[in-house]
Image (tube, helix red, strand yellow):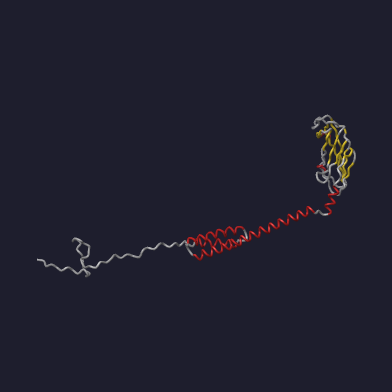
Amino acid sequence: MSIPQPPSDPHQPNYQPDHSAPGAGAPPAGYPYQAPAYGPPPTAPQNTGGNGLAIASVVVGGVGLVLSWIFLGGILALVGLVLGVVALVKKRGSRLLAIIGTAVSALALVISVIVTIVTFIAAASAITQINESLESTSVSQSPAAEAEDDAAETTTENVAFGETVTYDDGLAVTVSAPETFTPSEYAAGADQAANVVFTITITNGTDANFDPTLAYPSVASSGVEASSVYDSDQSLDQPSTTVPAGQSVTWRSAFSVADPAQLILELSPGPFEYDSIVYQS
């Protein structure tokens, strides 16, 4: 016969609950409840890269400050200012670095703007001075230049063929009376009723070289413009060699005209320096 044993004291270390009985696993009545132990709530991981924008603002703003005297410095300063402001708004990383980067970038941007304004003002002033200098030079010529212009002028007048017209600077022009011209087989431009040829002589009485290539005559007959005759077989080439001071050049110019009895020849030794001479029959 077994003798019932008193229940073991649950407070004793050797207490072992009967898991086969109903309500197994629960402490008997009177056993104090102990809540399960939990650790502290997990904390959010810290962002170790939050200083990136602030550092970039400091670096870019510093470079912009060094280069603030050129246009590139202003661009870098603006970029650094934007980075610094973004770092301050996001409140990530070192706030002190973000403030320093923003301040340095703002200073560089202000200096760059001031330098740009001063440069534009100086350039505009220089351009204005150059324009004023050019205008004063063109308006008030030196006495030597005015005397040179006066020497090249002569009164335009109609003269007879064979006469010599001398300009004030010493250049003299002579156009002979027209002569009948017979074109060769390979001549070009002989397409009117008659063909005439003129002998032109220019004497360079000036103290400078003269270019005869621009002394090309034009001819009209009875109100009809004459045609230039080109004939390499009869030496009708326009001279192109410079005429030194004290020398002269002579050449022939042929034209096909409507009426050889009524001829007008106009010649100017140069397009700007000399007035035209009008020869007529």
**Horizontally, is 164 left or right of 33 in the view?**
right
Q: Position of residue 82 (x, y in %)?
A: 53, 59
Residue 81 x/y as whole percent? 55, 60
- Horizontal and vertical percent position of residue 113: 61, 60
Residue at the image point whose x is 90% and y is 40% from the top: 163
Residue 144 in the image: x percent, y percent?
Answer: 84, 53
Q: Along the horizontal axis of the image, is 74 left or right of 33? A: right
Q: Is residue 38 visible?
A: yes
Eyeballing the image, is 19 above or below 274? below
Q: Quadrant of residue 199?
A: top right
In the figure, 215 relative to 258: above or below?
below
Q: In this picture, is 65 found above or below 218?
A: below
Q: Is residue 229 visible?
A: no
Q: Which quadrant of the view contains residue 70?
A: bottom right
Residue at point 36% right, 63% down? Answer: 41
Instruction: Name the image quarter holding the N terminus.
Output: bottom left
Question: Which residue: 15% across, 69% down?
Answer: 6
Q: Would you identify the image quadrant in which residue 9 lies?
A: bottom left
Q: Residue furthest left?
A: 1
